[in-house]
Image: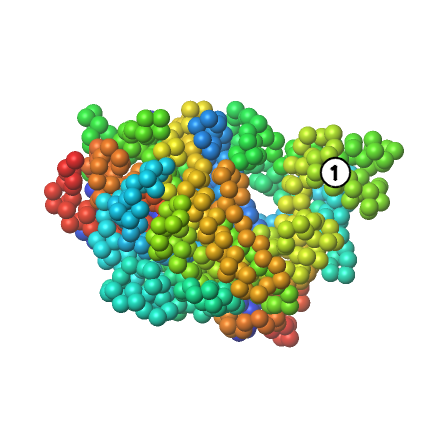
Amino acid sequence: MPPTASVTRRRFLSSTGLFVLIASIPGARAAEHSGILPWKPFAALPPEPLPGGRWYVLTPDEARTVEAIVDRLIPADELSIGGKEAGCASFIDRQLAGSYGTSDRLYTQGPFAAGLPTQGYQGADTPVARYKAGLAALNKHTQAQFAGKNFFDLAAAEQDQVLRDFEAGKVDYKSAAGFFNLVLQNTMEGFFSDPIYGGNKDMAGWKFIGFPGARYDYRDYITAHNKPFPLPPLSIAGRPEWKTGDKTSGN
Amino acid sequence: MTRKLPRKDVVIVGLGWTGSILAHELTDAGLDVVAIERGPWRDTATDFNVAYAPDELRYAVRKDLFLQPAQEAMTMRNNVSQTALPMRDYGSFLPGTGVGGAGTHWNGHTWRFFPSDFVLKTHLTERYGTDRLSELQLQDWGVTYDELESAFDRFEYLCGISGKAGNLNGTIQQGGNPFEGPRKREYPLPPMQMTYAPTLFAEAARSKGLHPFPTPSANLSGAYVNPLGIAMGQCTACGFCERFGCANYSKSSAHTTVLPVLMRKSNFEARTECEVLKINLAADGKTATGVTYIDVNGETFEQPADLVLLNAYGLFNVRLMLLSGIGKPYDPSSGEGVVGRNYCYQTNASAQVFFEGKSMNPFIAAGALGQTVDDYNGDAFDHGALNFVGGAGINCIPTNGRPIQYRPVPPGTPRWGAAWKKAAKQYYNNTLIFSSQGSSYATRGNYLDLDPTYKDRFGRPLLRVTFDFPDNDIRMSNWVSDRMKEIADALGGKQVVVGKQQKGWNSVPYQSTHNTGGAIMGTDPKTSAVNRHLQAWDVPNVFVIGASAFPQNAGKNPTGPVGALAYWAADSIRNHYLKNPGKLVEA
């Protein structure tokens, strides 16, 4: 890849602090525009990921349960680290803490009716409520089936069986399959989204599958048919190897 | 309380592709124009910033740039025996919002429909007789391909479309689409360089005697300055196209082709984050007096204007007509009425070929970078011995390798765990996908109206979509799937999986944002909502511009014809209406 444009761009970002500089100028929009093309430098709306190191929505026990689930959905093996180490549970917690968790962007007016499969999710519960209820139902199920044990206390094979039963809706919890699908979707989001959102630690998910990430210029490779792509992945925030003044990492 | 504002010559509802083109044309004609857009102001540097544009979670999964259902949802059902319920999240299709509209986050496939598509009912009746069409409600457009040729040309040159002509003034051209209608000149830019998968697909299609060609693309193959003097750059094949704004100024949209000139005009004004509630009519119901809108602070305004242009997404054009009492609402039980009539969609299926030991590099991609086969599209082939009308383009256009949503694995693979990991890794770089994009033909029972139960945040009824794939279209799509299997088998992969479309349109998985009809154009006010100039039959100072005007949909992406209709309507207004305001066609 020609090193000029995108490296310069990311050096600039990493050296100036992507999430501080640009985020500090909100409200550049006006309602009426005439005679000019409205534009202000740095009047951008970058992503606003929450910092890690704490749980926002999940209780410690709920977080431990989610960590156990994501580590079975994406188990550690010779291909990659597992979902827990990759940060999938922390990703889910941070997503639940934002507009996703509260369905702020969705149509949430009643009346609520069961609906047909072609009509999609018709429940009144937000993702936060679905996680709280689903995790409680999961542990209630394992406590009944495994002599009072919680999900995270089970052996891996037992956890897999419980997850398969939830996936197939073969447990005494009517939202089991829906809850399983929600967690599976969010786990994959965490493993494969940009690391700025708390999962995909060190781009482990992208290295695993072979996705080069936020590169943005492949012109030199379009006609390199059937040849392995040679460059490592990079994130919106750059690469861990990149440090100010580092002259060695041209990728 | 509603504040009444000073009169304007023209008020435009929605500042997307068609709104921008109409505003540019009518300000050039000296008119004082205001556009009212319910979404935010957006431009490339600010909102599609190169520093963070390639963010799959934010834009493709959480759909940051799209219309949010909290702002406006729709209800859906497959037929009148069901109770429609709201699509609480948009899934099957994703309407846009904001300046640029859905043209912000499109892929950029830029087609002309076939000449026969514009006279579909006449053409098919002459060729196959009336019995073949008995389950359908087909109509002619009231405008022909030849009449629209220069409008197509202007839109393509506005955009800098990259492609290869297949028919120049009636002479078939090597390497282009031999089935297209005659064009007066070449595309403004040559085709894009081909990635690996479409190259393999084209070889396989040629081996079956078919005629693949580069898909006409609004992702630019090179630098370009359009007739307005606006410069664009070469597409970098970044793989963040559909669902994203382009940070490179290399995907044609209102931002990259019109707005830099339009916004500098003193006789144009854009009001953003202002939602039009209704078109106001005079007491006689035959003249629009302007629009009423509500701004982001909840204040309502009346904007008087001599001319009202509906340039919202097609579905919202229809809803605004219904909410405003323009045109008679369609009733499927009697087949009478016009607003909501002939709602159509797109009939699609896909084929997957799994290989071993390849480097497909799916992330090297652009929204419209690929190859198309039109041998089985529209009426390009003889349907005499077949039991359907219509057809599908077969497209190998791998748009991205973004891994939250792109992780192909063969059927039967577990969705999680160690076995899933092994397959996901193996097939990410070893899968070739192509698909059919089929025509969608109108029936009496597929239509749009206002929902009796569910309301928007202002208490107005939501639009209700009643739709299922017609039997004719299912037969068509399944026949084309069999043709896809022939191509797929010729690709020499390890495993071939070809999907077949089924009844029961599902609003959840993404399929296509190609919703057409509901305010269709035509020659008879009993069966069309607007005349051949896109002028409302009943309210002649209202024009309704968009895919809402298509009497039925073809097996091609609609933006090219939408752009052509924008120029066609602009010409009608400039050359005819302004000289003599009133009905351009006497019914």
Image quadrant where one finds the C terminus of chain B: top left
Q: Is residue A119 above or below residue B177?
A: above
Q: Residue at image x 53%, y 36%?
A: A118
Residue B549 position, x and y percent, is 30, 42
Residue B286 position, x and y percent, is 20, 30
Dot 1 lies on which element?
Answer: helix
User: Which corner quadrant of the image does residue B451 belong to?
Assistant: top left
Q: Is residue B543 above or below residue B148?
A: above
Nearest the eye: A89 or A196: A89
The subunit letter for the residue under badge 1 reads: A
Q: Residue at image x 24%, y 65%?
A: B169
User: Which corner quadrant of the image does residue A97 belong to?
Assistant: top right
Q: Residue at image x 75%, y 35%?
A: A138
Nearest the eye: A119 or B301: A119
Nearest the eye: A167 or B347: B347
> Which residue has dot 1 on it?
A165
Image quadrant where one finds the N terminus of chain B: top left
User: Which corner quadrant of the image does residue B211 belong to?
Assistant: bottom left
Q: A10 left or right of B425?
A: left
Residue A143 position, x and y percent, is 83, 33
Residue B155 position, x and y percent, is 30, 57
